[in-house]
Amino acid sequence: MKSRRDTGFFSGLYSRNETLLWISAGIFLGSIIISYLFAGLLDAFLAPLLQSFQKRASEGVIKLETLSIFLNNVNIAFFIYIGGILVGIVTAFLIISNGAFIGYVASKYPLGDFIIYTIPHGIFEITGIIIAGAAGFRLGSAVLNYLNGVTKLKNNIPYKNQLIYLFQANLEYFKDSLILFIIAVILLLIGAFIEANLSVAWGQFIQSSI
């Protein structure tokens, strides 16, 4: 049996956070599917958001450029990650709301066209958001474990020593959350480059070949 020291960096990172990655993926992909299937019920909430997005895009406020797309996506990922401070509640909400918006947008276009034009960059961006969600949940678990430990402080041991021990005990959780977030950012950068420079040409090529 391999020790933690013998485990590869990425395989160890994955094994320690596998459950959270699957939870994040389930919430995000599930919200996309549900929103797509029940888009009509969400018109009152999401139609104004879509119209606002389309208006900003037509006015050039939202630009199809690598930096603009990346900053928008990394901003979303950051709040998904930092939302873990509140024990993952905000993280879960933002994953659901972003997934719901994607599913709703998909419902407004022919599904085949939507997939063709989004799959080149979507693979990276969706994976990035899922990993950012797992990072948020991992951060939330660190906060929860720390707070749980604080409630069990012993009077016969100096509080400062106990708090330092609690911090050190949860430091690996925090490190994992930060590493996961950095990986998410890298994936979002790749996705932004592909979306800005390749996705439209790819979609046109595929459509012309069908």
Image (tube, rainbow, N blue to C red):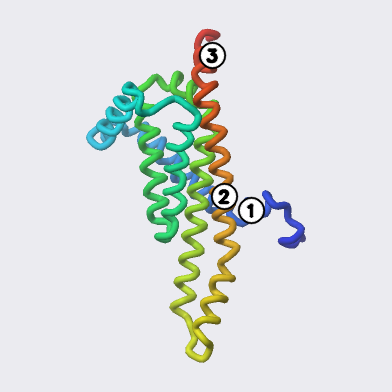
- The kind of secondary structure element at disc 2 is helix
Front label number (2 vs 1):
2
In percent of the image, x 74 and y 62: which residue is there?
A: 3
Direction from residue 33 to residue 48 in the image, left or right: left
- The kind of secondary structure element at disc 1 is helix
- Dot 3 or dot 2: first in sequence order is 2
Q: Vertical placement of 41 versus 163: above or below?
A: above
Camera-side residue of 144 and 168: 168
Residue annotated with mark 2: 180
Cα–Cα gap, marks 3 and 2: 33 Å
- Dot 3 or dot 1: first in sequence order is 1
Residue annotated with mark 1: 13
Residue annotated with mark 3: 206
Q: Residue furthest bottom?
A: 156
Total marks placed: 3
Task: Check disc 3: other Cα within 10 Å, few if <14, some if 14-19, many if 20+.
Answer: few
Three-letter amino acid code of the residue under disc 3: Ile
Cα–Cα gap, marks 3 and 1: 37 Å
Q: Position of residue 157 (x, y in %)?
A: 53, 88
Three-letter amino acid code of the residue under disc 2: Leu
Task: Check disc 2: other Cα within 10 Å, few if <14, some if 14-19, many if 20+.
Answer: many
Direction from residue 97 to residue 15 in the image, left or right: right
Three-letter amino acid code of the residue under disc 1: Leu
